[in-house]
């Protein structure tokens, strides 16, 4: 276990809002952050000490970045893995590269969960048009066709109903390798958010109940209803087994469906997560601060609720334009990410409210 003193430099791969909130948390603990991202307009770079704008496969730039850091983490799980192996000797990388490798492949992710005694939706690999017919015959319809790599917030997906023309769905995913997932009948969606320290200690935040709209998280509420809490222990146990198997350090999020047969694993995110944004005001220690604590080898902070109830609403697209109205309620905690253009489906900020 290596403890980094304040004043050390934390490298963050990715320049979005998660990097922005990590940087703010790191600064409060006295650390400097160095952002590495391919886009010049980085909302994380605006609040960080240093910024390198370069492509993810630019090994020379990536190496210079890594050599300037005392530890490296990431805010985006689709960072290319191969270049990371070439900088692994420059600075510790938390979470481990193996976690990225698994999370970037939806089939590997589901197999990994099953290997650790988790239950997933029925699924089948789709490598070409012919195998799509076989997959749907196997998992049934309705089903969801998802690209194996990339795609998030409903992107890279096509919902298949019984009797649909499968050619259209194959075109909708640009004929990319996919996984076909059978539908799951569920009552609620929820996520398990944990932090694991370098010493192996694991702490969980309250399990949030998540509501999605058009494939994008809209609301997270904690504490969750009983239908979720009844399945919380089993879901947490799976997430902990997965974290320990990867020798994980940092915040890990696993998403689940609550069903009559127990929790169904959906996917994991090896990073701080949108469904944990409420922890900034709603928990004693936020997911962002505890991630920094973990990767720097510091003691983990208390993850308990700071109020009886906490509710977080994402601000999608033009919803962020109502910032003045939102601020007129003095109990609202408004976070705007500094993104210039408001587009449909784009996460522009969030607002959190605590109930005492």
Image (cartoon, helix red, strand yellow):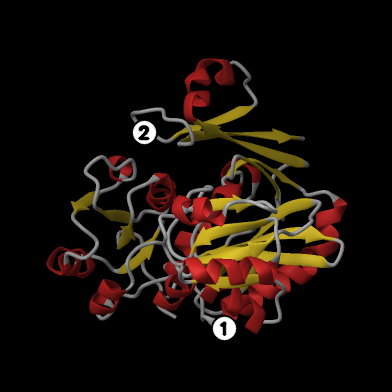
For marks 1 and 2 on the same chain, the one whose residue lies earlier in the sequence: 1
> Is 200 positioned to the left or the right of 235 in the image?
left
Q: Nearer the viewer, residue 47 or 231?
A: 231
Residue 61: percent from left, percent from top = 15, 63
Dot 2: what SS?
loop
Q: Residue at x 41, y 27 (%)?
A: 342
Disc 1 from disc 2: Cα separation: 37 Å
Specify the quadrant that holds the C terminus.
top right
Q: Position of residue 256 (x, y in %)?
A: 69, 60
Residue 328 location (% of width, % of height): 59, 15
Question: From this viewpoint, is residue 122 visible?
Answer: no
Residue projecting furthest to the left: 60
User: Can residue 282 be seen?
Assistant: yes
User: Pointer 2: what residue?
Assistant: 339
Judging depth in this view, the residue of 219 and 149 nearest the camera is 149
Q: Residue 245: give its label.
A: 1
CB of mark 1 within 8 Å of CB of mark 2?
no
Q: Residue at x 71, y 81 (%)?
A: 117
The quarter of the picture where the N terminus appears is bottom left
In this rendering, the answer to whether 70 lies above or below 76 is below
Q: Which residue is depicted at the point 41% across and 46% down?
A: 24
Query: Residue at left 48%, top 63%?
Result: 293
Hey, which quadrant is residue 232 in on the image?
A: bottom right
Other residues around mark 2 within 10 Å, as few (<14) / some (14–19) / many (≥20): some
Is residue 214 shown left or right of residue 175?
right
């Amino acid at each position: 276990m290596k403890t980094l003193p304040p004043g050390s430099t934390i490298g963050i791969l990715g320049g979005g809002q998660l990097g922005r909130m990590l940087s703010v948390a790191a600064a409060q603990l006295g650390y400097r952050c160095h952002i590495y991202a391919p886009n010049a307009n980085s909302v994380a770079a605006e609040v960080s000490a240093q910024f390198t704008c370069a492509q993810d496969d630019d090994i020379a730039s990536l190496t210079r970045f890594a050599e300037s850091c005392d530890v490296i983490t990431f805010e985006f799980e689709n960072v290319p893995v191969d270049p990371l192996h070439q900088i692994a000797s420059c600075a510790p990388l938390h979470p481990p590269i193996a976690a990225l490798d698994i999370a970037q492949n939806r089939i590997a992710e589901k197999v990994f969960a099953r290997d650790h005694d988790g239950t997933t939706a029925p699924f089948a690999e789709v490598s070409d048009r012919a195998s799509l017919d076989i997959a749907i015959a196997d998992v049934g319809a309705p089903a969801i066709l998802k690209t194996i790599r990339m795609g998030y917030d409903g992107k890279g997906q096509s919902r298949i109903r019984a009797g649909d023309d499968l050619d259209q769905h194959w075109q909708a995913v640009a004929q990319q390798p996919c996984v076909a997932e059978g539908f799951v009948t569920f009552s609620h969606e929820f996520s398990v958010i944990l932090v694991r320290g370098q010493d192996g200690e694991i702490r969980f935040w309250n399990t949030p109940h998540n509501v999605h709209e058009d494939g994008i998280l809209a609301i997270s509420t904690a504490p969750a209803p009983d239908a979720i809490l009844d399945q919380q222990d089993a879901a947490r146990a799976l997430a902990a087994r997965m974290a320990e198997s990867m020798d994980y350090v940092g915040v890990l999020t696993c998403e689940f469906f609550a069903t009559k047969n127990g929790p169904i694993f959906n996917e994991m995110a090896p990073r701080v997560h949108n469904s944990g944004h409420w922890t900034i005001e709603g928990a004693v220690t936020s997911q962002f601060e505890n991630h920094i604590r973990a990767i720097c080898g510091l003691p983990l902070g208390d993850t308990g609720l700071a109020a009886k109830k906490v509710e977080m609403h994402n601000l999608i697209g033009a919803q962020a334009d109502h910032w003045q109205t939102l601020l007129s309620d003095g109990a609202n905690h408004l976070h705007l990410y500094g993104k210039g253009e408001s587009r449909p489906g784009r996460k522009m900020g969030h607002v959190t409210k605590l109930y005492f």
